[in-house]
Image (cartoon, rainbow, N blue to C red):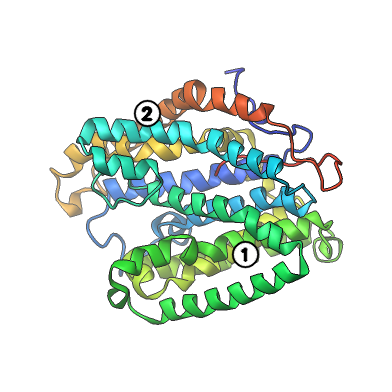
């Protein structure tokens, strides 16, 4: 597979952080393994109320992989602007053009397949506009909600950066931030039932997931300014390793709590957990791009880099493949038979392998041609016509 190039789609190949590609690989495996376990081994409340081995909490807790994707988006997409990229009409147009080339072709193919299978043309048309359409197109659209959240971030990011560069704009941002903080706190203080039809938009849209993007942007600002303090706090590999271990332990505790109370309870009453997860992931990212902790090779390697590169295709295809391959067998068994059934374990492994194979084909024949078009878009110049090197790409 010599055509697999980790730098495909980069508008400036001189700046590439393989660590971020590997984090994307980690994020997609967390998502795929969570959905595999949900489909193959769980009934209704999943592991709610059960004790699980501590490392398994990273899989059983639910959407922490998506949270990591959001943090990476905040970092990668804001970094060019924070490093001084121009914000004129042409540069912003290229930014949106790059986003379209990155996410629309593969997504529209997934929507077309869902429409062809379900016959739901009207709902499919809504999905083409990145609107959340519930589960009427299940199992194809179970993961599409996060793309809608991503698109909301894409649309607002240039405006945010424009305001950030002007004194009056910063005042507007502070006021908007205070309004958002008040509304966000109020949304956390009420039960999902009290929010009614606003529950999902409030908690899974950019409004509810803004902390994840914001923490990623904060790390990007720190990185763009030369990583001040890194030489003091991360001066040695052992110091960086100690910070990593602490972050992993904290994340494990948060995810263990989410596992024990159940995803439903997290969504209804403990949505703030996603914000703490995002903070831990952002700090984890900051350490990774500033130092090389002991054991970093377990994450920064060709396996995670490869799966990070095909992560978008894998994100789009894995859920329907898991469903169609696993549901006929799983639905015929009792709940207490699932974990001890060799057939379920073997078929789960096969479904993951098939998902990876289909993702590879989709990447090769759908994503890659458009990535090469995206690569031709000029890199955003600095505000002063000085070229800026930037890593870009979809999470």
Q: Which element type, helix, strand or loop, lies under badge 1?
A: helix
166 sits left or right of 175 in the view: right
Q: Nearer the viewer, residue 279 or 156?
A: 156
Give the position of the N terminus as an image quadrant. top right
Q: Residue 106 appears in which quarter of the rendering?
A: top left
Q: Nearer the viewer, residue 28 or 113?
A: 113
Q: Nearer the viewer, residue 226 or 36?
A: 226
Give the position of the C terminus as an image quadrant. top right
Q: Which residue is tagged 1?
A: 247
Residue 148 position, x and y percent, is: 44, 50
105 sits left or right of 42 in the view: right
The correct choice, above or below, for 62 with respect to 178 in the image is above
72 sits left or right of 202 in the view: right
Residue 321 position, x and y percent, is: 31, 34
Residue 17 position, x and y percent, is: 72, 41
The correct choice, above or below, for 238 with respect to 180 in the image is above
Q: How far apart are the two marked residues, 2 and 1, measured between alpha carbons?
A: 33 Å
Q: Which residue is tagged 2?
A: 354
Taking the spot 50% from the left edge, 37% from the top edge, the residue there is 103
Taking the spot 66% from the left edge, 74% from the top edge, the residue there is 174
The correct choice, above or below, for 39 with respect to 49 in the image is above
């Amino acid at each position: 597979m010599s055509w697999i190039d980790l730098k495909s789609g980069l508008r400036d190949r001189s700046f590439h952080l393989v660590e971020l590609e590997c984090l994307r690989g980690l994020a997609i495996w967390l998502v795929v393994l969570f959905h595999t376990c949900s489909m193959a081994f769980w009934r209704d409340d999943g592991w709610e109320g059960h004790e699980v081995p501590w490392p398994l909490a990273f899989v059983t807790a639910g959407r922490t992989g998506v949270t990591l994707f959001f943090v990476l988006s905040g970092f990668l997409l804001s970094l060019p602007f924070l490093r001084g990229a121009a914000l004129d009409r042409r540069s912003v147009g290229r930014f949106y053009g790059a986003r379209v080339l990155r996410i629309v072709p593969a997504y529209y193919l997934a929507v077309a397949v869902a429409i062809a299978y379900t016959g739901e043309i009207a709902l499919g048309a809504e999905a083409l506009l990145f609107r959340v359409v519930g589960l009427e197109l299940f199992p194809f659209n179970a993961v599409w909600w996060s793309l809608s959240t991503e698109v909301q971030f894409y649309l607002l990011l240039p405006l945010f950066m424009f305001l950030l560069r002007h004194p009056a704009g910063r005042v507007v941002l502070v006021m908007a931030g205070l309004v958002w903080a008040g509304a966000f706190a109020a949304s956390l203080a009420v039960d999902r039932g009290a929010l009614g039809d606003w529950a999902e938009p409030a908690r899974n849209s950019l409004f509810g997931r803004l902390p994840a993007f914001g923490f990623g942007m904060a790390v990007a600002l720190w990185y763009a300014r030369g990583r001040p303090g890194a030489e003091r706090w991360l001066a040695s590999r052992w110091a960086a390793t100690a910070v990593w271990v602490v972050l992993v332990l904290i994340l494990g505790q948060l995810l263990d709590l989410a596992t024990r109370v159940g995803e439903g309870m997290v969504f209804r009453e403990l949505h703030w957990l996603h914000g703490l997860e995002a903070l831990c992931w952002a700090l984890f990212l900051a350490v990774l791009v500033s130092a090389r902790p002991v054991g970093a090779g377990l994450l920064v390697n060709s396996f995670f880099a490869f799966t990070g590169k095909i992560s978008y295709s894998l994100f789009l295809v894995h859920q329907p493949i898991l469903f169609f391959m696993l549901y006929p067998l799983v639905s015929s068994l009792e709940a207490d038979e699932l974990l001890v059934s060799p057939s379920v374990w073997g078929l789960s492994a096969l479904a993951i392998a098939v998902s990876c194979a289909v993702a590879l084909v989709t990447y090769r024949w759908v994503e890659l041609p458009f990535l090469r078009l995206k690569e031709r878009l000029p890199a955003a110049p600095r505000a002063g016509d000085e070229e800026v090197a930037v890593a870009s790409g979809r999470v």
